[in-house]
Image (spheres, rainbow, N blue to C red):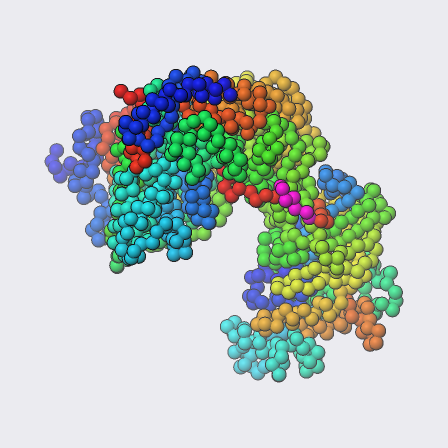
Amino acid sequence: MPITGRRRHHPSRFSAIGLTATLGAVTWQASGTAQTVAAPATPLPKSTLAGPAGDPRVIGLAVSTFRFAHNAGRDDCPAGLSPFITHQYLKTLPEAERARLSAPERDPELNLRATSLPDGADTTSSPAVALARSPGYHSLHQVQSKRSWGLDLDKDMPKDKVCPHQAFIGMDGEKGVDNQFYRAMGCTKGYRWDKAAGESVSDPFDNVDLSGSNSNGFRDGQMTILIEISEVDDPRNDPSVKVGIYSGRNPMTLNARAQMTPYTSHSIDPNPRWHNETRGRIVNGVLETDPFELRLKQSEVSALSEYVLRHAKLRIALNGDGAKGILAGYTPISSIYWPIPATYRSAYARNIKEDNPASYRTLYELADGYPDPETGQCTAISMARAVTAVPAFIVRSAPVDKAADATPQKVGG
Amino acid sequence: MSFRNFSRRSLLRGVLRGGAVAIALPLLDMFLDDNGAALASGRMLPQRFGTWFWGLGLTSSRWVPNKAGADYIMPEELKPVEKFRDRLTLLTNYRIELSGAPNHVHFSGNCAIRTGTAAKMQGVAEAPSFETAISKQIGRGTRFRSIEISCAGGQNDSYSWDAGNVLNPAETSPAALYTRIFGSSFRDPNASTFTPDPKTMAMESVLSSVKDSRDRLMKVAGQADRQRLDQYFTSIRQVEEQVAVELQKPAPADACVRPKPVVDHEIGTDVEWAQKNHKAFVDLVLMAVACDQTRAFNIVYSPSASTLRRKGIGANHHILSHEEAVDPKLGYQPETTWFVEESMKQWAVFLEAASSIKEGAGTLLDNMLVFAHSDCETARVHSIDGIPMMLAGRAGGKVRTGFHLAGNGDQASRVGLTLQQVMGVPIGSWGTKGFETSRPITEIIA
Amino acid sequence: MKALVALKRGKLLPTLTLMAGLLVTGMAVTANVPASRPAVSTGGPPQIRRLTEAQYRNVIADIFGPDIKVEGRFEADMISDDLAAIGSSKVSVTAAGAEYYTNLAEGIADQLLSEERRARFVPCTPKDPRLPDNRCSAKFVALYGEQLFRRPLSPGEIATRVSLAENGTRKLQDFYSGLRYAVVSLLIAPDFLFRIEAAVPTPNGAELDPWSRASRLSFLLWNGPPDAALLTAARNGELATPEGLARQVDRMMASPMLERGVRAFFSDMLGFQTYATLAKDGVIYPNFSQGVAAASREQTLRTIVDHLITRDEDYGKLFTTRRVFLNRDLGALYRYPVAAENGWEAVELPESMGASGILTQASFVALHSHPGRSSPTLRGLAVLEKFLCQHVPPPPSDVDFSLVQDINNASLRTARLRLTAHMTNPTCSGCHKLMDPIGFALENFDGAGQRRLDENGAPIDTSGELNGVKFGNAQGLGAALANDPATARCLVNRVVGYGLGRVPVRGERRWVAQLNSDFNADGRRFKALLRRVATSEGFYAVDEGQPSAPAPRTAQTGQVTAGRKPS
């Protein structure tokens, strides 16, 4: 997955299109400095967020960053980043052949061979076969550090919905933070926000401009996420508010700084499947929701899929410029793995350097939610998204004023 | 004196000082084999002339050299062009004579330098600018009589007037200029074959056809309208000549290399954009000159009352020049001066580009003459005395360079007169009212 | 009304005289002019106006259809006496311009005669497509020549083009390739690029010829060329009678093309040419994108058309209305929700948003600001110049502003404080006292047109003054402007100057004053004003002795002389 602008310059153009692609790790941000989720320094002026013409009891937001909430600490990966599948493959070859295939112009051949099974199938489409054939060959380094972004997800889950796992300490010191996806993928290139390692940002909340192709999903309207907080009596402290998270249907508009333009009107996608509603509370300017089931429209490259989080929770700090915080929940592994071969069955699949069978195995190994009733194997994995949002007007129905929208005269002046 | 010693300079001095010039200068070219520049092939290089304009001048305390002559110390604001000092002539302390007309800020100075006549109204020139007389003189047989450039996006940021109310519009898009000069109508002068385009052949008669209406219209139009119509017919004739040129095999041009197509970036008053576009324009214009597509050009890096601005700063160069306080320690306005110094860096960009194109025994810069000037001296007070003026290049040996000439408060119109004469325009005096002069600056003429 | 009655009364006899003259000279049609009309207006000199870029585009679209692309550069319009329409009477064609027009002409000709389109445009088929067919080319040239020159062509003018086509066809061995040169020749002709007004002699002086009348009318109302019906009305003398003229004016005002004309007039009056170079600092005003800039222009034109044409409201209320048009780009700038996803919607803004007609729209407050900050001075100047036709002299050249103003001074946080410091200088204060207090009322809108209540943390005081009327905010300014008699008078002057292509001459003042009192009596309805101008005798009057360009000898009208008294 090409996470950042810098990734586009990676020596192998397609190497980044791996598992992340379908996981929806779209780089997308707006203004707002990265801090931990805490009470905002300045009190929230309600009128600012709602807009002078808006309902004062409603706060509308359009999501402008939706990155994996992954840290890039120095002690995360003592053994280094996970090796590319091509690297593993080369180790199996005799010296002369290894040297031959290591030449840059042999890269396509190397990719093809490293990701092919004897019957010609590709390893991504048949991860179980690939793993059974040579288990030691597929390798993924796991995160070793103790701290992570995320939320404590399982504290209000029934015991039988959880598999044994190790929790992180949150970046704010919060105990019991669940982010097994970070543990699994956090040592894989493209999943870390590490400027030293060539990423364009060093923090999941960091500012980048959105003019690059990486934010296409958001720019073409395929993945606009809207948050509406209503029944707000006091934006600083309110024990009960309504929270809706919706797929929008309009592309975001970029301003002159290539960031999301605040106070734009956005229409909600009419498909009720992507309307998610829950309740929550605001404490000292921080909104925290009850758990809910989240489904959002999602577009990655050419594949339309769905972004699913179960037992999801949103915790965002509201401020004058919008909001910033964490969206966390359990993602069904099948929903994030299987679209990959479906999407990249073409030539792309053979250009992937990420070791997808290794990811497949590790995700199931670390899965911590929703065990299969028969096998007991957990089917979903905890994860967290870094979210920033700008003020927006959320429009439910979009009746176009026919009279006002008469085609303008082509030639004006 | 013997005929052998009858140099161009002595002739000019002798004849021009006498006031009445009966000899058209181009006739003198027959005497000039020792001074004219020739290509290796023996073919004479054409005369070229350009102007380079920047807005809001220089700071008087920081650009006038301490002494006249060749061994002056390069002043602070001219440091960027130090490298080119032997090809530069600094003209300081020349004055604008308004003869009772008001000082229309950011216009009167540059307009008078160009037209020899004080403007009565802001933005309206009373006479053609002198470089159009030069381009008409030297531009015969080229596709473009002159190329006008504005780097900050304003089509009307041009100080070239064919007549009082005829402002030659400036190109603002490098990509459009590329297409105009080097697009499909371009004929490579160094190509071995040449086939005239039959479509172009037919165009020639089309252009002549519109002239049929000339007599009818001119006979009855009022005086002002007659001038306007006359200008129209002259302009149509210009295109006709351009078409005629395109139908002839061009003469080889040693330094000509068709540039790669240009893509536009942002166009506007942001100083970074203007500088990017300036570089693109300079490369195109100089190659157009090297390819003999034109022999005259006018480049405006920043308009008078410069609107250039830096991102994130509310005031542009012009506003800063009025509102910024003089730093008591430095003795000048620091933010404003940043823009001033940038202007000279861009002038250096031009000079660098012109001297990096090899042509004949020297460089393109050696074989042209460029007149750089601004609209005022110290912008803060709209000073029109001592407006910065410089000459660069040697016009193939026709001018002397490498020194500082202090003008002693002389009329700035002497510069326009001298440049016209050097470029072969047959005139003996130039300018009107207090700006009229028949005294060329002989120190410049080689 | 008075003028019309007078015209009717004085009309009969001269018409008969003229008719007799027509029979004698063999002229089929000419202007129809009363001999002893009361001098409502002397008229002024006929004009030669270069087509503006918008007019050129409209002409091509109207004659050939909107699918014919006009691609290429134009010479910039010139503003003179506050209008490009007046500047168009002063500009010519530069060498670069001749190149632009030639390129445009070639591009258009290529499209018209392309294989897909030639059947649509060429009204005949050549006998042999490789050979000249002069009858066919003549038919084509006469058909489009009349539309492009806005008058019939003389036999000589047709013959020139036919021979061009013939020679071109011989050179290129293709009829259509040859015909291309006839098209180019029409499109670079002075009679196309310039609107050359011609006068015909009358017993009492001179009068615009019918073709020039048709053009004045169509460019006033439509900013485009006369259509077929109007050319017919010119040909058959209809335009020369008050009834016929009124019929044409009513027809044209009922046309959807009126909106194009009204947009063009107000774009000129409001100085929207400036949009070509409008840019805001992306760091200071990140949300003022090019999309917002374009939308802000459209917003104001929609407001004007809605207010003045669709709803036919009082012109003065254009400065106070809270009804605006928004799309989503502008909604973001205004922080106002917009339901329409792709188009525009009309919204009555709440009073709390401080809107006051077109004054507080970005097309005014952002256009008259610096790239990185607002300017009460520029806005005040624009109100005076654009809406009141009042001129402020330029600042003196020898003032050193930096001595009285220090923008780094932390105590001068608002524009008012900075400018008040400025006004302590007596050389400056005279004019700044006129301009700045107008602009102060608009300071709740920043340099990009976004609403704000404070500047650099200091609250903004929006009290101000216009020509002695004090007010507290933008709505107050809007009301003061709406109530100022100069506002209506200025609009009338602008319409007249726009229509004539020049400032009214002395002999036209009485006519303009009459238009102004009629405009006020009509409740300042813009449509009524347009109709009065378009149907008034004064609009077509020509001052005798004033030079003008002639119409050529044309196939239909025979010899027509210049606008001079026949000797």
Is C233 inside the magenta-drawn segment?
no
Quadrant (top left/top right/bottom left/bottom right) for the C terminus of chain B = top left
* In this rendering, position of residue A228 left or right of residue A408: right
Residue at the outermost left position: B2
Residue at the outermost right position: A159
State the residue at coordinates (22%, 47%): B44
Q: Compared with residue A164, is residue B15 higher up or lower down, i.e. above or below?
A: above
Return the residue nearer the eye: C54 or A333: C54
Residue B237 on image: x %, y %: 28, 40
Quadrant (top left/top right/bottom left/bottom right) for the N terminus of chain B = top left
* In this rendering, position of residue A281 left or right of residue C389: right
Q: Compared with residue B301, is residue C11 higher up or lower down, i.e. above or below?
A: above
**Which image quarter: residue B394?**
top left
**Which image quarter: residue C215?**
top left
Residue B418 on image: x %, y %: 28, 32
| Residue C317 visible in the shown view | yes
State the residue at coordinates (29%, 32%): C558
Q: Compared with residue B151, is residue A135 higher up or lower down, i.e. above or below?
A: below
Which stretch appears magenta? Answer: A398-404
| Residue C268 visible in the shown view | no
* In this rendering, position of residue A268 left or right of residue B320: right
State the residue at coordinates (75%, 54%): A245
Q: How many marks?
A: 0
* In this rendering, position of residue C245 left or right of residue A311: left
Residue A83 on image: x %, y %: 64, 71
Residue A385 on image: x %, y %: 73, 58
Return the residue nearer the eye: C340 or B342: C340
The secondary structure that most of the magenta stretch takes on is loop
